[in-house]
Amino acid sequence: FQSSQKEAIRVKEELRKEVECLRADLQQVREDRDQSVAQLNTLTAELATYSEQARKSSKDSELLRIKAAAFEETCSSQQEQIETLQKQLAVATEKLKHADVTAIEAMTGYESQKETIKDLEERLAYAEFQIIEADKLRKKLHNTILELKGNIRVFCRVRPFLSDTDSNGQEEAIISYPSSVENAGRGIDLMNQGQKCSFSYDKVFDHSASQDDVFVEMSQLVQSALDGYKVCIFAYGQTGSGKTYTMMGKPGRDQKGIIPRSLEQIFKTSQSLESQGWKYCMQASMLEIYNETIRDLLAPGRSSSEMPGGKQYTIKHDSQGNTTVSDLTTTNVFSTADVTSLLEKASHSRSVGKTQMNEQSSRSHFVFTLKIFGSNESTGQQVQGVLNLIDLAGSERLTKSGATGERLKETQAINKSLSALSDVIFAIAKNDDHVPFRNSKLTYLLQPCLGGDSKTLMFVNVSPEASSAGETLCSLRFASRVNACEIGVARRQTQSKSSSDNSNRLSYG
Ligand code: ADP
Ligand code: MG
């Protein structure tokens, strides 16, 4: 028993231990179960969320499928676009290739054009050079022509009948013109006391010649003043024969005389020569020689009471042949308008004298002088020309005017100075050692412009009336003596040689 008891105790102990163990196990199992339940709960919850998510994502995937379909659509349309763009690109590339070719062609074209331009520029430069050379040649040839014609030339101009004298056409024509071809435009016949006298000059203008016809014949002469020559143009003839009309003319386009036309031409030509590098500067002066006394027609504030000779007006020539008159007003002129106002001023001064001094204008010599200074910067040339335009006093002879006293003195002074002028011209023509320049104020004033390489033109103006026949004959005879000056062949040879040398010095030195 004891042993069984012991046994039973031991068993009981074992069992109790076993129970304890089991209890522990149970406890463990319970705990496990609780844990599993808890796990289950969380898993259920998770499942719920997952299934929720699964629903969502199935929605999403639906959306994505739609989107994908849309994308596929876009994609295919873009594919199409790409294809068209590729086609376009191909075309563009083709075009570009073509353009490249054209560009190369253009480039070569441009190159050749550049060549052409260079060529043209060279030719232009050469042409400009030729123009300059041709201009030099022109000056030289013009000079030669004038030398061959004689440096003193004579033009004759016959005034038309003035309306009050030929009103009935009763006046018999004493002037006629030879019809021979040889003398056409150069000859003139005068009937005087039943005798026919024939004359010929470098040019004869009949009564119908306009101011323009006259000027055309002398524009070359005016041009030479710009080329650096000393030029003198005289109007000679009895009072009323048209000297002032020829030189000054009357207001109005067509009636303008040589003086305004010359100035217009000079200003116009000097402007066109500017393109060849020429710059000109001009100085004008105007004076009157009355009874061997110089009067300044441009003197400022010239009053009618002022006595001529109040100032000295001494004439001086320097070694270069430049003339200065002391106290004489010289004015820089820049345009025709400047000169026009000067001419107006001068004619006003003259008319003041006219009333006071008994028609002095026809009893005095009027001298318009334009000094021209030209320089060419590109060629370094310099020229100095002078243009003298002279309206001489009436040439009628002493007996005709039948004057006494003051008038006699006047007429003597005029005759003396006109004969001094002819003496000078004839002495130059004969190549005399002594030329009597100092015998009158007029010849002394014009000394450098009457000899050497200067160019002189004498206008002999004549009246057509029978009552003037005697004076007309005198004028024509005087003119043909002057005209004869150029015929001296020996003189012309030596003169032409020296004058061409001079011309070289003047124009191209
Ligand atoms: P001068 O100056 O020689 O004394 P003018 O020039 O004063 O002579 O001329 C005298 C008149 O004759 C003036 O009225 C002038 O207008 C006129 N006359 C002169 N020549 C011509 C001509 N070629 N045509 C028209 N009228 C002229
Ligand atoms: Mg006059």
Image (spheres, rainbow, N blue to C red):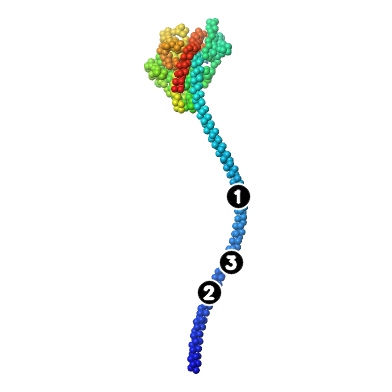
Which quadrant of the structure image shows residue 94? top right
Across and down, in percent, residue 364 comes to 44, 14
Which of pointers 1 and 2 lies earlier in the amino acid sequence? 2
* Tag of residue 39: 2
Label 2, secondary structure: give it: helix
Q: How many marks?
A: 3
Mark 3: few/some/many CA within 10 Å (<14, 14-19, 20+): few
Q: Which residue is mark 1?
A: 86
Mark 2 and mark 3: Cα distance apart in space: 23 Å
* Number of the front mark, 2 or 3: 2
Expressed as whole percent of the image width and height from the top left, the position of residue 148 reads: 50, 15
Pointer 2 or 3: first along the chain: 2
Determine the residue located farthest toward the bottom in the rendered image. 1
Residue at the spot of label 3:
55
Residue 304 screen position, x and y as percent = 40, 17
When the figure is inspected, residue 202 is found, relative to residue 58, above or below; the finding is above
**Is residue 474 among what the camera can see?**
yes
Q: Is mark 3 within 8 Å of ligand 1?
A: no
Q: Three-letter amino acid code at disc 1? A: Gln
* Label 1 or label 3, whichever comes before in sequence order: 3
Label 1, residues with CA under 10 Å away: few <14, some 14-19, many ≥20: few
Any part of residue 407 in sight: no
Query: Residue drawn 44% across and 8% down?
Result: 403
Give SS at disc 1.
helix
Estimate the spatial distance between the alpha carbons at disc 1 and disc 3, rounded to whole Å.
45 Å
Look at 56% across and 68% down and name the residue there: 50
Pinpoint residue 106: horizontal percent, then vertical percent: 57, 39
Mark 2 C-beta to ligand 1 under 8 Å = no
Amino acid type at image mark 2:
Gln
Q: Nearer the viewer, residue 106 or 146?
A: 106
Q: Quadrant of the C terminus?
A: top left
